Amino acid sequence: MPPEPAVIDMTDPAYWQDPHRFMRAAREQHPVAFATTGEPIVLRYADIERLASDHRVESNALAFVERSVESGPLVEWWRRMLTNVNGPEHRRLRGLVSRAFTPRSVDAKRPRMRELTREILARHRDTGELDVLHDFSHELPIRLICELLGVPGEHHDDFSHWSTGLGSALSSVLTPELRKAGEDAVAGMSAGIAALLEKRRSAPCDDLLSALLRAADELDEDFSEEDLVVLVINLVFGGHDTSRAMLAVGVALLCSHPGELDRLLRDPSLAQRAGDEVLRCEPLVQVMSRECPADLEAAGVRLPAGQPFMLAIIAANRDPEVFDAPDRFDITREGPHSFSLGWGAHRCLGAALARAEFEEVIPEFFRCCRNVELLVERPEWVPFANLRRIERLPVRFEPA
């Protein structure tokens, strides 16, 4: 008889420190595993690519929050996030943001990305030490996305606090404290964005908020105040939480692979590939939750209609049938794309911003900081987090 699918316990703290080990063992046993909560977990690249390309398959990550909270502002916000909206409504909302949040607007910020990198790192020249996560990658992306939107500098700390509260609340182990922080963040950020939108209506500026309002007028559709507020929260949360994790993980991987770091320093044009390889090796979103109104199958396992199943990005990105030496970190790697920034209709809205930040910030970081030494043998990962991130990353360096 063929082997039975494995069961992956994502409530095990050990899983979060090395999910690759668990996913690899499960994938070797069977192309599909099961979560302890019963959802099938699709593990192979080919199956995920096929299911991701099926237009009937919809995104639905509501259960991630609703298992812990059945009602309230946190749940209502999560239901409105683009990751949980599908079909015509998703296209309508995403189309609005795409008209305002363009690759050109991102590219215009590339010099500012390098400038912010130098500015933040200059504070640590005298000590030659910093925590990459808390002293650097936490601050840079929130300042950048706030500047893009047109949030005044005196409110950046508020938006940073709110975004952090939302990120902490998206946890599979939701304590009362984390829930309150998340609900306070939803309320605070919603009110702050609504106030800024009102100002931009009467006095437009050269910023993303004004561009969003112009695009809404040009499309001549009935975009509600709630639509606009939730879309901006998407941008703030995605632009901050994703990038702070990505930049810290990028520094950690390059420091742990000095040969690859040397390649990047000798040839900065490799920055784009390096960013892709960081996200392939350590995707920030481990699994994508999906469902379909019709029965599907993967490797002979039934995916029942209307029931959630998971697409394990973290397993597909290291599928040995697709990637040569899949556990090797290689910034010159060519070949199939990874699924780390999503795909199709649900491709990451801020993918262009995330790529630009890595391409500009990471080389600038290592130009400003020479001989960077990790002060931890192995970074610890935050357990139970919807968006994977490391706990802390203390380093010592020589100022350039």
Image (spheres, rainbow, N blue to C red):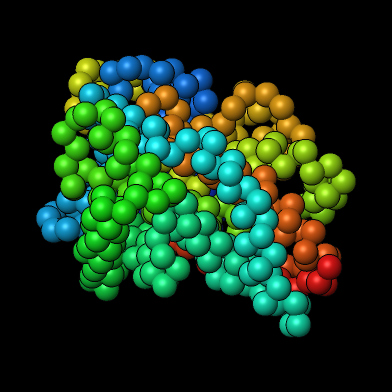
Left or right of 53 on screen, residue 191: left
Q: Position of residue 193 (x, y in %)?
A: 28, 58
Q: Position of residue 328 (x, y in %)?
A: 72, 40
Position above or below: 52 against 73: above
Position above or below: 105 against 128: above
Q: Does residue 370 appear in the picture of this structure?
A: yes
Q: Does residue 26 appear in the picture of this structure?
A: no
Left or right of 48 on screen, residue 361: right
State which quarter of the image contains the N terminus: top left
Residue that extends furthest to the front in the rendered view of this protein? 203
Q: Position of residue 285 (x, y in %)?
A: 46, 45
The quarter of the displayed image where residue 33 is located: top left
Question: Which residue is at 52% across, 57% downward?
Answer: 144
Question: Which residue is at 82% across, 72% downward?
Answer: 398
The quarter of the displayed image where residue 292 is located: top left
Count of numbered circles on the image = 0
Residue that extends furthest to the left in the rendered view of this protein? 71
Position above or below: 349 against 154: above
The quarter of the displayed image where residue 34 is located: top left
Question: Which residue is at 80% across, 51% downward?
Answer: 261
State which quarter of the image contains the C terminus: bottom right
Question: Which of 162/386 is in front?
Answer: 162
